[in-house]
Image: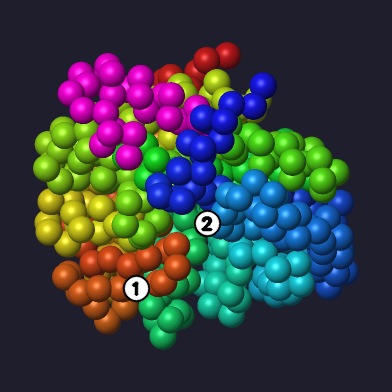
């Protein structure tokens, strides 16, 4: 039965509290596009993506109009391209980047993810070539996003890949220095990467997925903050319960959008990622939720505890509202994409060290953080290694998306525009980890990986 009160509440959330569907992402398998001739493979990829996603954007626009809820991004994720490259006689992966870019432009999506490699336990054929080509691929395209998984709880951490990714991140920033180092903002390094993640830059279509699926990522931190603001004098148990109820309402909208998009595109429904994904807009901030809970500023002592409670409550509320939950699911803490995080970083209340502690309980990791442009490659690698270790030991997804701000130093600003936002260059500990990173090899999987 339709409840008028629920309809009016949803309208208020959309108009006043920044409720939106952050993304509808179509996942497309490219395994049937494998061919030893790279040009033939590229043609197959372009044909399949443009065929499967031909109506993705029009259908999303139609749903937006019907429901009155904004769908901010329409995206595509594909099978990690390193797997397709492995079968090619010619190892020139940038050709795939151009094919993906051409397809993205044809169907009109915002981003296409999957220029990716999975090297948690070592390099297979095509992996190293793909990874080394990432800076060039991101510099010569507009819509491509890239990710590399360098470890997992089951496999440990590939320290050779970690060392390589420090160089790749730095080079991606250097090649796009004339565009505010945007290349590094479209590259993420994972431990325990999920195979059904709809959020960029980390989205790729896992090999265990169906041939074509629809995944939805919800948003709504402004709705949670408003609910807390309007409910005074709750103890922390009451706060948790209120967040759970609010997350349920937000996720129901995501479930509806997923169902409609799946039905109209005649594509299997995938998952709803029930993450709170912030934007630089005022009132749409995870940091402001934490401050509403009772912190003077995000980054103060108590931030990690408050975030842990928030993340848990979001998952408990959201999982009841969706038939299939997946992706990252929880609370994002991307510095440049969150108005409250930006302010806290500028004031010095929020440091990289505190952010690292917060990643032990958030939904992903060190995300969209500007660092000095002269940060050594091995320091970037060590940041990746630290974050991967948190994910490996805690059996959770962690990731690093840092942007070396070429030509800038601590306190300077770097702006990307749109959802990627802007923010200050943050201080990094530059005591050298070079010898550690240079050892190479595999950090062994922890004992808790032996569950069989």
Residue 112 image position (x, y, % from top left): 64, 61
> Measuring 36% from the left and 50% from the top, which residue is drawn there?
284
Q: Main secondary structure of the magenta part?
A: helix
**Precedes in sequence: disc 1 or disc 2:** 2
Q: Is residue 192 magenta?
A: no
Q: Residue 201 has which mark?
A: 2
Q: Which type of secondary structure does the marked residue at label 2 adopt?
A: loop
> Measuring 18% from the left and 23% from the top, which residue is drawn there?
233
Range of magenta residues: 226-250
- Residue at the farthest front position: 4
Residue 140 image position (x, y, % from top left): 59, 80
Separation of marks 1 and 2 at Cα, in angstroms? 17 Å
342 or 41, nearer to the observer: 342
* Foreground label between 1 and 2: 1
Q: Is residue 347 above or below residue 287?
A: below
Residue 291 image position (x, y, % from top left): 20, 41
Quadrant (top left/top right/bottom left/bottom right) for the N terminus: top right
Quadrant (top left/top right/bottom left/bottom right) for the C terminus: top right
> Measuring 51% from the left and 37% from the top, which residue is drawn there?
8
Q: Residue 415 has which mark?
A: 1
- Badge 2 crowding class, 10 Å Cα cut-off, few under 14, some 14 to 19, many 20 or more, is many
């Amino acid at each position: 039965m339709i409840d008028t009160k629920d309809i009016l509440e949803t309208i208020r959330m959309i108009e006043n509290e920044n409720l939106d569907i952050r993304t509808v992402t179509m996942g497309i398998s490219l395994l049937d596009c494998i061919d030893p001739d790279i040009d033939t493979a590229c043609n197959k990829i372009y044909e399949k993506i443009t065929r499967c996603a031909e109506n993705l954007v029009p259908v999303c626009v139609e749903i937006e109009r019907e429901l009155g809820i904004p769908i901010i991004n329409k995206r595509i994720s594909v099978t990690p391209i390193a797997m397709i490259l492995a079968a090619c006689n010619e190892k020139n992966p940038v050709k795939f980047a151009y094919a993906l870019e051409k397809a993205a432009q044809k169907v009109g999506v915002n981003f296409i993810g999957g220029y990716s490699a999975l090297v948690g336990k070592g390099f297979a054929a095509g992996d190293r070539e793909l990874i080394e080509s990432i800076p060039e691929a991101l510099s010569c395209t507009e819509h491509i996003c890239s990710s590399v998984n360098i470890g997992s709880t089951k496999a440990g951490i590939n320290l050779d890949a970690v060392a390589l990714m420090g160089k790749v991140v730095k080079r991606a920033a250097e090649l796009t220095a004339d565009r505010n180092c945007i290349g590094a903002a479209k590259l993420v390094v994972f431990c325990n990467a999920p195979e059904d993640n709809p959020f960029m830059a980390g989205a790729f279509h896992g090999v265990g997925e169906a041939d074509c699926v629809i995944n939805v990522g919800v948003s709504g931190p402004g709705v949670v903050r408003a609910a807390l603001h309007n409910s005074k004098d709750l103890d922390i148990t009451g706060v948790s319960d209120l967040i759970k109820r609010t997350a349920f309402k937000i996720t129901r909208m995501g479930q509806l959008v997923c169902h409609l998009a799946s039905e109209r595109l005649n594509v299997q429904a995938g998952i709803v990622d029930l993450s709170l994904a912030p934007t630089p807009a005022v009132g749409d901030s995870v940091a402001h939720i934490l401050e509403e809970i009772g912190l003077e500023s995000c980054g103060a002592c108590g931030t990690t505890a408050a975030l842990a409670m928030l993340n848990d409550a979001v998952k408990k509320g959201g999982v009841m509202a969706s038939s299939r939950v997946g992706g990252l699911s929880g609370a994002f803490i991307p510095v440049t994409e969150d108005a409250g995080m930006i302010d806290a970083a500028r004031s010095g209340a929020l440091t990289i060290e505190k952010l690292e502690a917060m990643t032990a309980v958030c939904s992903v990791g060190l995300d969209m953080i500007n660092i000095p442009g002269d940060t050594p490659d091995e320091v970037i690698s060590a940041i990746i290694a630290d974050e991967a270790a948190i994910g490996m030991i805690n059996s959770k997804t962690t990731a690093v998306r840092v942007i070396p701000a070429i030509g800038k130093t601590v306190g300077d600003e770097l702006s990307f525009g749109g959802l990627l936002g802007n923010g200050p260059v943050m201080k990094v500990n530059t005591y050298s980890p070079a010898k550690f990173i240079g050892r190479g090899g595999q950090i062994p999987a922890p004992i808790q990986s032996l569950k069989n």
